[in-house]
Image (spheres, rainbow, N blue to C red):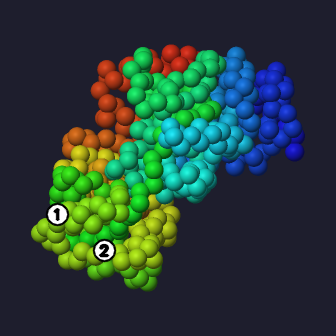
Amino acid sequence: MTAMASGSLPAVLFEALAAIFPGDALRCDEPTRLVYGYDNSRRTAPADAVAFPHRHEQVVALVQACREHRVPVIARGRGTNTTGATVPVAGGVVVSFERMNRILRIVPEDRIAVVEPGLLNGDLQRALAESGFFWPPDPTSAPYCTVGGNLACNAGGPRTVKYGATRENVLALRAVAGSGAELRCGTPTTKGATGYDLVRLLVGSEGTLALITEATLRLVPKPDAVATLRAAYVDVDAAARAVARIMAQPVTPCALEFLDDASLALARAHRDGAAVPEAGALLLIEVDGASETLAAAVAAVSRVARGAGLLELRVAAEAAEAEALWAVRKALSPALRNLSPQKINEDVVVPVSRVPELVAATKALSARYGLPIVCFGHAGNGNLHVNLLPRDDRERAAAEPCLAALFDAVIRLDGTLSGEHGIGLAKREFMTRALDPGALGLMRGIKAAFDPDGILNPGKLLP
């Protein structure tokens, strides 16, 4: 289906875009504009047009044309983010990178892969497995989220505790700034001391500085062996203190997930009790490494996990049992959706030593506001998903002040607003609590240098 002129775009701009994006690569029909105007935050706003680039040069031409007419440009992966970061609240052109989805090359000897932003994380992982590698970011949405989306919000996942989030696993980028200027930054080397680190600046910038069209990713060899452990505790405080002990000893687990008592109750109901123990809290721990050293690593982690309050420590004997243990964690999202379709999922972070205080704070907030709160997530780096679950009008009204109180508590604990979901629209108003005026002023200056007319993803990230 070819493009049809949109009354919301200047005619001369529409003509320019139609020349850049022939055939069905530019869409202005209402269904397409609506479909590409929402994301997993449940927020929605229709785009004026949707462009589907095939190559870098089209992105350059699009940004330059839109800048000339001061029309917003919003980069989009698959819309899996939960903060409204890809919703075109000011209209404009949504740039969907789904057709720029190629793996350009994999170089095992350099441990790198060069890819386009529309490549699905899951497709990348399958291709890398053939060479014996993986890319560390592994968000829950990995089967259907894009690498570009992972770059935009600095995505993480369970493996982040050992291997780092997206920012630690990107070496170089090709991009188009809001000024229309092309840039390459970084190198395909693991060391470099040449100028400012623009790669780390662009990763996590949520499409407000530049549109990324190519990424050189740092790969990690797949470990020889993996062991999965389940540690059940009498209460959340005992489990949270075990997290701090585990992370203070030399063996770093590749995953360390925390589930509170409310999480376990929901998972038990959702899975008819299968593999979900009766406990006050649960840790799922994964340890990987060389086959000959794995037993010693499991023993070291088990030793510190056996502190006060432990009810049961279980090591999966085979792959099927390990999958059953992880199924408890994976059952949570659908169970939470069933309980509260309007759930608010925040991914706050505190220092690992203060995880017990964060868990205690969420329990206190739940009691104060009379609002169900479920807490789980990547406890190994202090990144917990705090889910507010309003079920009726009273609880929905309580959610807003409760959320503000949660962020205040996190900041008091030397934490931050987001570990992997980003800021987008949802947490934008809280940025002044998380950052001082000097830092925000410098961020505004950086934004102006990359995007002098403010056309890239307006209304996001910065307050």
Depicted 214 relative to depicted 389: above or below: above
45 relative position to 461: left or right: right
> Quadrant of residue 357 in the image?
bottom left
Alpha-carbon distance for marks 2 and 1? 14 Å
Is residue 151 at all visible to an observer of this figure? Answer: no
Q: Give the percent coordinates (x, y) of residue 198.
A: 46, 24
Q: Quadrant of the N terminus?
A: top right
Q: Which residue is mark 2?
A: 315
Q: Which of the 4 image quarters holds residue 310?
A: bottom left
User: Residue drawn at (79%, 37%), measured in percent from left and top?
Assistant: 26
At x 24%, y 74%, the residue is: 313
Label 2 Cα neighbours within 10 Å, binned few <14 / some 14-19 / many ≥20 = some
Q: Position of residue 189 (x, y in %)?
A: 46, 30
**x, y percentage for residue 239?**
21, 65
**Circles 2, 1 touching at the beta carbon (< 8 Å):** no
Image position of 443 with respect to 290: above or below: above
- Give residue 318's quadrant in the image: bottom left
Q: Which residue is mark 1?
A: 304
The amino acid beneath tag 2 is Val
Between 22 and 127, the one lying in front of the other is 127
Q: Residue furthest left?
A: 308
Question: Which amino acid type corresponds to the residue marked 1 in the rendered image?
Answer: Val
- Mark 1, Cα crowd under 10 Å, few <14 / some 14-19 / many 20+, is some
Q: Is residue 247 left or right of residue 210?
A: left
Residue 68 versus residue 304 in the image, above or below: above
* Number of dots carrying numbers: 2
Asked if residue 210 shows in the view, the reply is yes
Q: Nearer the viewer, residue 113 or 353?
A: 113
Disc 2 element: strand
